[in-house]
Image: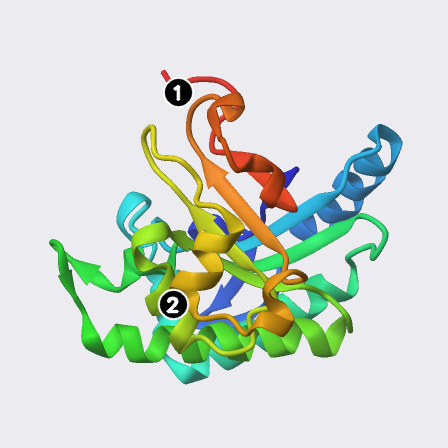
Amino acid sequence: MRIWLCEGAEGILINSGVITGAHPVLVESIAIIQESAALCGLRLYWTLLDGHSSRDTNDPVTRAIMSEPEHTARFAELVAAPIATRLDRRLTVGVEVINEPEALMTDDGRRDEEQWRKCPVAIKAIGDAVRAARSGTMVTAGTDRAMLAMLWNNAPGLDAVDIHVKGDQQLPSRADVIRELGIALVQAESIPLIGGYRGDGAEQTHRADYNAIFRWCLEPKT
């Protein structure tokens, strides 16, 4: 199960415009979710931030975290790392630093080159903080297939490929992903491959190539 943690800056404590930590209710919620997951036999894929929240919820915090080094560092140290220390290794599939960061890097369809330079640096810094707090944690950043190569080639340190397709598009095969990203042969068979899609999973021809696949919504939005 994929769990969103700080979408729209939810659970991030801020004082006078400065990030000061994670809200106690968020921390408590993680414990409750993990207890429930253990009882139900579920594993958890944690998503920290959402690139779409800046536009969808008028959230300036996520953009600041992904573009301003001071906010990146404070989020990494005071929110991401403390969250990571509370994650149960037995239940955790991985930690996604941000869902679809490309949503922060475009403006009316035009690519913001400055944001493209800053965002991968922030992803690495936050990912490094997660690993330092909980060694062995798989760190990812999910992105639309059209932007996957751009993100992968500019955000060093990602441990898995998390690729999203929209509409009725098919998730690509492992062979196609490896070829498009130029991943070395020594990694080709072992690198985790995660997919996100809309629609009917039975229609995903290459679903056996993926370590995990997530639907965006279990029920249609009304």
Element type where label 1 sits in the image:
loop
**In the rendered image, is residue 139 in sight?**
yes
When the figure is inspected, residue 44 is found, relative to residue 41, above or below; the finding is below
Q: Residue under circle 2?
A: 151
| Residue 61 figure quarter | bottom left
Mark 1 Cα-neighbour bin, 10 Å: few <14, some 14–19, many ≥20: few
Q: Is residue 118 above or below residue 41?
A: below
Viewer-nearest residue: 134 or 175 = 175
Task: Give the residue displayed 80% in from the left and 36% down from the top.
Answer: 37
**Residue 218, image x and y in percent?**
53, 23
- Element marked by disc 2: helix
Query: Picture coordinates of residue 136 (x, y %)?
Result: 77, 70
Residue type at tag 2? Leu
Say which label, 1 or 2, has the lower sequence index: 2
Residue 215 at x, y = what percent? Answer: 51, 32
Q: Is residue 61 left or right of residue 173?
A: left
* Residue 36 relative to residue 150: left or right: right
For the point 52% across and 81% down, which residue is it? 73
